[in-house]
């Protein structure tokens, strides 16, 4: 199978490219190497696979509709794993125009090209943040999710809706995967698992909202990749599917696990949570099990141990 992976130099994208190549697929890897976080980290991510004989790496921006059309015309991908986006709930506040431009307009450019070039399956990386402050626990895909708390989840919800339009009008198979708190080796430096680890190591203060009494459904990167690959392999018409672990963890406990791994206590600041932050995210993964054969394997303590092992090797040297 020939797969276009957007956001290929990012945390999830790089892991996905490696997994696809390892099983024998051809990969068209696309990233614009922007400076949302240091491009050096992204260059290091693609160094693992950029010379692979079945990988073609393109430095390009999904907002450039003409370049996207040329890319599809030249390489004719059979499936698309669309991971490229501006991420982060908090960073999106006050940046709605940027998030609309990249996450909405850029995604439509890809959907247009997929329609024009007979792509068989389009898998879109959405987010658990679309659920906002729903009272439904665990979070289930039938929730309307019409009250996003920040521009980032609003932009993801918009493409979930537009994806239905493309399936309805153009018969493009479209699956939106709602990722829940992904973590693991090579995690983004702005994400909580890396940030907590790094600040404990360096003796720096960590902001832990509500004294760590919030819960997150931490999902290890290998489990997410297994779910994405299963979705790429299964054209389903139109579906929205949660990819989480289904076992939310108290943030105070999460920090304690990292403290034990590092062997140091965290320096904590514990302000109230801002209105962009729900108290809990918690995935119902019954649909993923049924449609994708998805079964997460990695417990949080084991996944954080793998993150710590990587951190010691790659960051501490």
Image (cartoon, grey):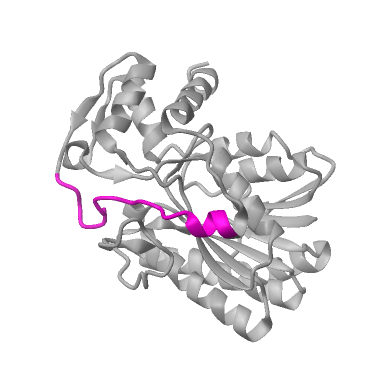
Q: Is residue 300 above or below residue 108?
A: above
Residue 256, given in percent of the width and then of the height, sits at: 29, 25
Residue 160, given in percent of the width and then of the height, sits at: 50, 70
- Give the quadrant of residue 262: top left
Asked if residue 94 shows in the view, the reply is: no
- Give the quadrant of residue 46: top right
Examine the structure image and report whether residue 301 is included in the region drawn in magenta.
no
Residue under the point 77% across and 74% down: 118
Residue under the point 85% across and 41% down: 53
Q: Nearer the viewer, residue 237 or 108?
A: 237
Residue under the point 62% across and 37% down: 45
Count up the numbered dots: 0
Residue 1, given in percent of the width and then of the height, sits at: 80, 55
- Left or right: residue 160 versus residue 169 is left
Q: Nearer the viewer, residue 229 or 204?
A: 229
Residue 236, given in percent of the width and then of the height, sits at: 64, 68
Asked if residue 118 shows in the view, the reply is: yes
Residue under the point 60% across and 60% down: 291
Q: Which residues are magenta?
A: 272-290
Q: Nearer the viewer, residue 48 or 171?
A: 171
């Amino acid at each position: 199978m020939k797969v276009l992976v957007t956001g290929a130099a990012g945390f999830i994208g790089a892991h996905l490219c490696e997994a696809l190549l390892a099983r024998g697929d051809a990969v068209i890897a696309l990233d614009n190497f922007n400076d949302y976080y240091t491009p050096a980290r992204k260059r290091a991510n693609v160094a693992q696979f950029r010379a692979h004989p079945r990988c073609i790496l393109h430095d390009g921006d999904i907002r450039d509709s003409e370049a996207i059309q040329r890319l599809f015309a030249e390489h004719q991908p059979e499936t698309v794993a669309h991971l490229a986006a501006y991420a982060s709930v908090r960073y999106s506040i006050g940046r709605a125009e940027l998030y609309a431009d990249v996450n909405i307009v850029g995604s439509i450019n890809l959907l247009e090209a997929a329609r024009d070039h007979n792509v068989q399956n389009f898998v879109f990386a959405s987010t658990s943040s679309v659920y906002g402050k729903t009272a439904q626990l665990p979070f289930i895909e039938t929730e309307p999710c019409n009250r996003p708390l920040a521009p980032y989840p609003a932009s993801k919800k918009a493409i979930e809706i537009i994806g239905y339009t493309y399936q309805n009008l153009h018969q493009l198979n479209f699956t939106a995967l709602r990722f829940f708190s992904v973590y693991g080796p090579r995690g983004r430096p702005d994400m909580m698992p890396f940030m907590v680890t790094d600040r404990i190591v360096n003796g720096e203060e960590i902001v832990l909202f509500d004294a760590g009494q919030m819960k997150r459904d931490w999902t290890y990167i290998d489990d997410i990749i297994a779910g994405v690959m299963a979705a790429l392999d299964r054209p389903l018409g139109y579906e929205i599917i949660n990819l989480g672990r289904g076992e939310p963890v108290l943030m105070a406990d999460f920090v304690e696990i990292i403290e034990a791994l590092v062997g140091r206590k965290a320096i904590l600041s514990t302000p109230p949570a801002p209105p962009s932050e729900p108290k809990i995210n918690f995935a119902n993964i019954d649909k993923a099990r049924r449609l994708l054969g998805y079964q997460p394997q990695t417990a949080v303590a084991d996944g954080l141990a793998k993150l710590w092992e990587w951190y010691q090797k790659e960051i501490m040297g």
